Amino acid sequence: MYGVWTPEQVATAEEPVLARTPEGALMRRAAHGAAQVALRMLAEGGPVVGTHVVVLVGAGNNGGDGLWAGVELRRRGVGVTAVLLAPDRAHPAGLAALRKARGRVVTDVEEGVAAVGRADLVLDAIVGTSGRGGLREPAPRLVAAIGCSVLAIDSPSGVDPLTGTVHDEAVTATETVTFGARKPVHVLNRARCGLVTLVDIGLGPELPDAPVRVLDAVDVGRAWPVPGPGDDKYTQGVVGVAAGSAVYPGAAVLASGAAALATSGMVRYAGSAAHEVRAAWPEVVATDHVADAGRVQAWAVGPGLGTGEDGAATLAHVLDAGVPVLADADAITLLGASSDLRARAAGNPVLVTPHAGEFARLVAELDGEFDPAADRVDAARRAAAALGVTVLLKGNATVVAAPDGRVLVHPAGSSWLATAGSGDVLSGVAGALLAAGLEPWWAGGCAAFVHARAAGIGAGRPGAPVPASHVRAAVPDAIREVRAAALAAS
């Protein structure tokens, strides 16, 4: 697990470090790290000597990082052109050092555009993590001329460093190098950041508790329930699945199958798709009504359930059962429309897993601002606190927010999970983890991780489409991967 801090928290942590280090030393350390990443990127295309790098230099310290990185690249035989977007506000010491190292300095926009077009690598040092809003002229013209790989210094310019949102024109980086700590943009917008490298500049002891955390395979593998010698099918967790209908029997089949494959001791299905579930998963104990399902240790409810009176009655039944509940799809719509159902859920171990449209319905009757498009983390955190449940906001960056303010983010490597039925698979996996005893925040984070990994395995190759049934089938392989990572780290 690693932490993510806001730009303001990182800036505050830098202050005592700057006070006890020689002037300019911290910037030189950061620039050295950036230069090392740039050299690696250049080496991927062949010999480094003789290549040419263009640094797009904005005002202030971010531009200074780029200029000093350019100095180090010059010392390794790389041609460097610095295009100054704000010549009168360029970092004085960095600019003087680059000129001394015989780097080229350009202030004319057209000359800069031509240099960018000939570059082997562009360093984006236009705006750092203190910047807000889109790019301003002449930056968009220079960025539009890029035809090579881009290394962003700290954060891709034009992408909001706090929320990952894009304002008009922005840089799309091949890789990003950041300093001291990861910021929200690095996990909320991987599409713009690319591969992120963190350079240690000694901020660790000065940073507060991280407001956002990201799980890795070792964390998930260690948390995943593994049966011991004394376990049986009941002690491993019995999960109930209330999903599907005559119109949507596939939702029941996908959710029940995913729960079975996610190491549940037993899966009990209750609903009108019982025949289809039995046919697909003979190990699932299937009945027609939740009242007849028998004892369970958690419920997964909602996919394909329907939003009429029967669906509302089913949701009310499982919320009153006194066990953890995973609420997805139609169950989310029912919660959003009923203050009574929300009151039954509040304060209990309930995990809701909305996509953007479902999230809007979930918070429609609540007081306050909940805008995932503006700030996904803030919207999920506010909703969790207002509802008294854990909220897993699906998306390319999945956010899991607990009512007490804890937040996990899982940055997916692709968008292939945006397909019909994939959420039903997530419901089954998360329900199994709840039944095994994981609290909703951990169950949501671990399920999101394995779900995304299963999509990668099910796709077979990068960029390939993956239907939900393939994601479900790959769940055991994804679990084996995280368990292997945990064992290797022991």
Image (cartoon, rainbow, N blue to C red):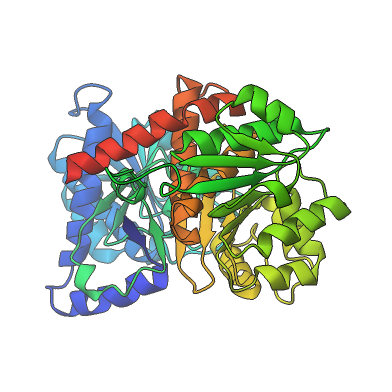
Q: Nearer the viewer, residue 48 or 207?
A: 207
Q: Is residue 61 above or below residue 152?
A: below
Could you tell me which residue is drawn at 18 percent across and 44 percent down? 489
Tell me if I can see residue 113 in this picture: no
Could you tell me which residue is drawn at 68 percent across and 36 percent down? 252
Q: Position of residue 346 (x, y in %)?
A: 64, 72
Left or right of 7? Residue 335 is: right
Find the residue positioned furthest to the right: 309
- Quarter holding residue 284: top right
Tell me if I can see residue 178 in this picture: yes
Q: Is residue 461 above or below residue 123?
A: above
Left or right of 132? Residue 419 is: right
Q: Position of residue 404 (x, y in %)?
A: 49, 74
Could you tell me which residue is drawn at 42 percent across and 62 percent down? 129
Q: Position of residue 57 (x, y in %)?
A: 38, 53
Query: How many discs appear?
Result: 0
- Quarter holding residue 165: bottom right
Q: Give the quarter of the figure containing the N terminus.
A: bottom left
Could you tell me which residue is drawn at 59 percent across and 63 percent down? 380
Q: Nearer the viewer, residue 82 or 191?
A: 191
Q: Position of residue 350 (x, y in %)?
A: 59, 62
Left or right of 309? Residue 193 is: left
Q: Nearer the viewer, residue 475 or 239?
A: 239
